[in-house]
Image (cartoon, helix red, strand yellow):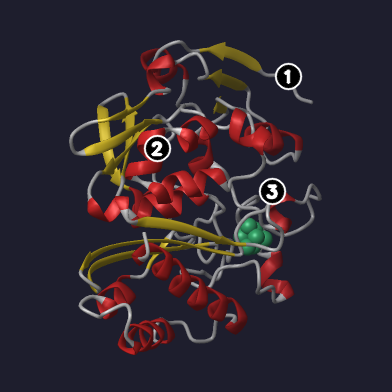
Amino acid sequence: MREFAFVRATSVADALTAIGSADTMCIAGGVELLNLMREGICAPGTLVDLSGITELSQVSMTGSALVIGALARISDVAADADVVHECPAIAQALEQIGSPQIRNAGTVGGNLLQRTRCAYFRNGTIDVPCNKRTPGSGCAALLAGATRAFALFGRSSRCIATHPSDLAVALAALDAQIVVRGPGGERVLAAQDFLRTPGTTPQRDHNMKANELLVRIIVPRGALARQSVYLKVRDRAAYQSALVSVAAAVTLQGKTIKRAAIALGGVAHRPWRLASVEAAIQGKRHDKPEFHDALVTAMLAIPPKSADATKRAIAMRAVERALREAVAL
Ligand code: SF4
């Protein structure tokens, strides 16, 4: 392994002083970064250890929002009674991440900043073309005609990978905000815009700058967040990324859907909000066939139609099941 310098930060100001250069990277739980270093995907010259910044590890509830520090441990947030009660989709998403060891070591910020599980990207062989790993080298997944594990939506001719964060999907559905801090102060990004589509620069996963730190997550409290669920579909019940996941939240008036919020995971390079489906089921009674009919019609209308039919069908069924679980809460 290549030698690197190791800097311990004990405050956000410390960390901001240390980051910014191209070969400096941050480490907190170490779950993802050590894998990336072992796989030869990155080789930082300096590692900045954030784990001593206690101000970023708190979970708190204000009158209007749940506030989660970026360095809060996944298992701590998943078990937090306020999170379970006020934002069940977030607790459920966190509970289904990786393994108990990963949830105990990993942080919520690290979960958002993890990289794709595309097997070609993770492959240690440098002659496998991958635009995310080596920009301009090509895309082995596209060359192989890969489908099932790859994106349905927001694909580009450079990359068809998906992002594996469960938490990002729940945050996108609940209109959460991601707060980042840089030398000039704080910036607030909508959770659904924090991760990006690959476009012509698939090497970039998110919209944070190199000299910024992710500091906290803000989730609005209210009826929508309280009536939310997270459903994860995968081949085995643990330690696997979603083939498809759904975060769904509703508010009801009797049996009529007043408002719905739906985000899909495992289908794009970022969480994929289903605005047209949300609009289609608004005002429909969830106990009547009109609900199912509107949902299916809206799901089938989402382009591109050419994307993998099996995965689309799984996504459609998962959305309906998640919504039925949400209305039953
Ligand atoms: Fe690389 Fe993206 Fe292609 Fe996977 S899908 S091989 S991550 S460029």
Q: Secondary structure at mark 2?
A: loop
Q: Is residue 8 left or right of residue 179?
A: right
Q: Taking the image as four quarters, which one is ligand 1 found in?
A: bottom right
Q: Is residue 32 left or right of residue 182?
A: right
Q: Secondary structure at mark 3?
A: loop
Residue 207: x and y, percent? Answer: 39, 46
Quadrant for residue 104, please give it: top right
Residue 167: x and y, percent? Answer: 47, 47
Residue 157 visible from this viewpoint: yes
Q: Which residue is mark 2?
A: 209
Towards the viewer: 228 or 266: 228
Q: Earlier in the sequence, mark 3 or mark 1?
A: 1
Residue 73: x and y, percent? Answer: 51, 29
Q: Between marks 3 and 1, how big is the CA–CA gap?
A: 31 Å
The C terminus lies in which quarter of the figure?
bottom left
Q: Residue at x 61, y 67 (%)?
A: 150
